[in-house]
């Protein structure tokens, strides 16, 4: 089996809420998703999707992804997409960094591998261990009454894992969490996500001021060393996200005892091939993970959901349903959501098919 063509599509995804706002004055209403279609000489087609959360969240720029793919596509054409590690080596030789662009091709290769084997991707990633996965829902940064209303709505929909975006003045965030905590149920898991906005002294003050509230603090400061300092000085468990961008970063955090949990965003780490390794390292180390991505529709959700579903229950903190954060869907067959949990089909590959009426063709590369 050989790759004969690579097609690159883009589409705009509009956030279903008022605005997706988080710390640092960052707020987005529309996201640009990139979908890659790999076609093979045996008629098997694979799909991958990546979607940065705006231009100022991670080291990825949506408008630059087609340019990166113009370098990557020629080196994978003619290769066997089922050889996922070999394909990744080829991409690394052609382009340094730019993990998100590589993720689009890597995810499509795993889709083909599953279809060729007649198996869902989760079987190839280790087997189905979580048929029903707990979801978290994000309470976007806003006025306190708006955030409280969002929290109550998600609870009524069955969600028991809540990620609360912080980023007001520290004193205001202290008051916010104290107020919201009056409604916290004993079966709920809360994460206060600062998105790297605070100094270490602010993070320590915040933790000390809400000492009686049970929640994780996610990425309290921008730098790794700052987060490590905070982790050693507070009583709340620390979850790392933005400061982890490679397997080496994760290994360092494990060696330093820098985290109690982590966010594993599949596209940020370069796709399923490297993410599977990071997942297994964290499972062995006893670090629970939120397995998700930065943004996306049904294809992106399916990719990380297959990794989450093949993760032991003890190591899966939760996942999310990004395809339901948008006003439109780019694919059919996305994972199903009910009562705050998500399930996958047993269809071969990722189990999703793009809706090409929603996509704009950008480039075609052929043998």
Image (tube, rainbow, N blue to C red):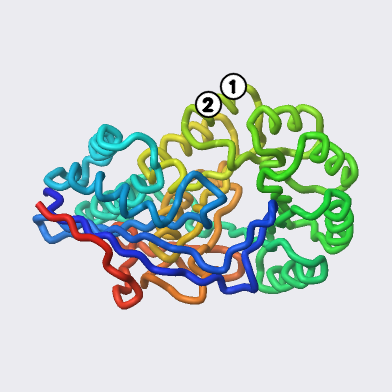
Q: Position of residue 98 (x, y in %)?
A: 39, 42
- Helix, strand or loop at label 2? It is helix
- Residue at image x 37%, y 70%? 331
- Residue at image x 66%, y 69%? 158
Quarter holding residue 276: top left
Note whether 347 is above or below 76 in the view shown: below
Are the residues flagged by discs 2 and 1 in contact, CB closer than 8 Å?
Answer: yes
Q: Position of residue 289 (x, y in %)?
A: 57, 43
Q: Position of residue 304 (x, y in %)?
A: 45, 53
Residue nearer the viewer, 73 or 125 = 73
Number of numbered tags placed on the structure image: 2
Note whether 357 is above or below 147 in the view shown: below
The answer to whether one can see residue 314 in this image is no
Q: Position of residue 178 (x, y in %)?
A: 88, 55
The answer to whether one can see residue 66 in this image is yes
User: On the image, numbered disc 1 is attached to which residue?
Assistant: 255
Note whether 112 is above or below 29 in the view shown: above
- Residue at image x 42%, y 65%? 298
User: Is 306 left or right of 145, judged from the image as shown?
Assistant: left
Please give the label number shown on residue 251: 2
User: Is 88 left or right of 56, judged from the image as shown?
Assistant: left
Residue nearer the viewer, 217 or 129 = 217
């Amino acid at each position: 089996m050989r790759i004969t063509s690579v097609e690159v599509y883009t589409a705009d995804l509009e956030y279903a809420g008022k605005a997706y706002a988080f710390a640092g004055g960052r707020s987005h209403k529309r996201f640009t998703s990139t979908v890659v279609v790999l076609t093979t000489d045996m008629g098997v087609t694979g799909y991958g999707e990546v979607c940065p959360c705006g231009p100022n969240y991670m080291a990825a720029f949506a408008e630059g992804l087609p340019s990166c793919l113009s370098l990557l596509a020629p080196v994978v054409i003619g290769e066997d997409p089922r050889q996922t590690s070999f394909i990744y080596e080829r991409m690394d030789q052609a382009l340094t960094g730019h993990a998100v662009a590589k993720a689009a091709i890597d995810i499509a290769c795993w889709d083909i591998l599953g279809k060729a084997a007649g198996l869902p991707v989760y079987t190839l990633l280790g087997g189905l261990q979580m048929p029903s996965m707990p979801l978290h829902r994000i309470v976007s940064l806003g006025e306190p009454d708006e955030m409280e209303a969002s929290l109550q709505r998600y609870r009524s929909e069955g969600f028991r894992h809540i990620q609360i975006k912080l980023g007001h003045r520290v004193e205001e965030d202290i008051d916010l969490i104290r107020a919201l905590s009056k409604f916290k149920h004993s079966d709920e898991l809360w994460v206060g996500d600062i998105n790297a906005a605070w100094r270490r002294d602010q993070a320590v003050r915040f933790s000390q001021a809400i000492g009686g509230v049970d929640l994780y603090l996610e990425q309290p400061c921008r730098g790794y060393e700052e987060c490590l300092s905070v982790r050693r000085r507070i009583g709340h468990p620390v979850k790392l996200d933005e400061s982890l961008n490679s397997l080496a970063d994760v290994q360092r955090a494990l060696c330093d005892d820098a985290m109690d949990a982590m966010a594993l965003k599949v596209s940020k780490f370069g796709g399923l091939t490297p993410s599977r390794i990071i997942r297994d390292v964290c499972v062995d180390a006893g670090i629970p993970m939120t397995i998700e991505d930065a943004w996306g529709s049904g294809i992106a959700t399916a990719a990380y959901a297959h990794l989450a579903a093949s993760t032991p229950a003890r190591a899966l903190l939760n996942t999310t349903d990004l395809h339901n954060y948008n006003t439109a869907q780019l694919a059919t067959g996305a994972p199903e959501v009910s009562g705050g949990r998500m399930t996958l089909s047993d269809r071969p590959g990722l189990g999703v098919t793009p809706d090409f009426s929603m996509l704009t063709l950008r480039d075609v590369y052929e043998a």
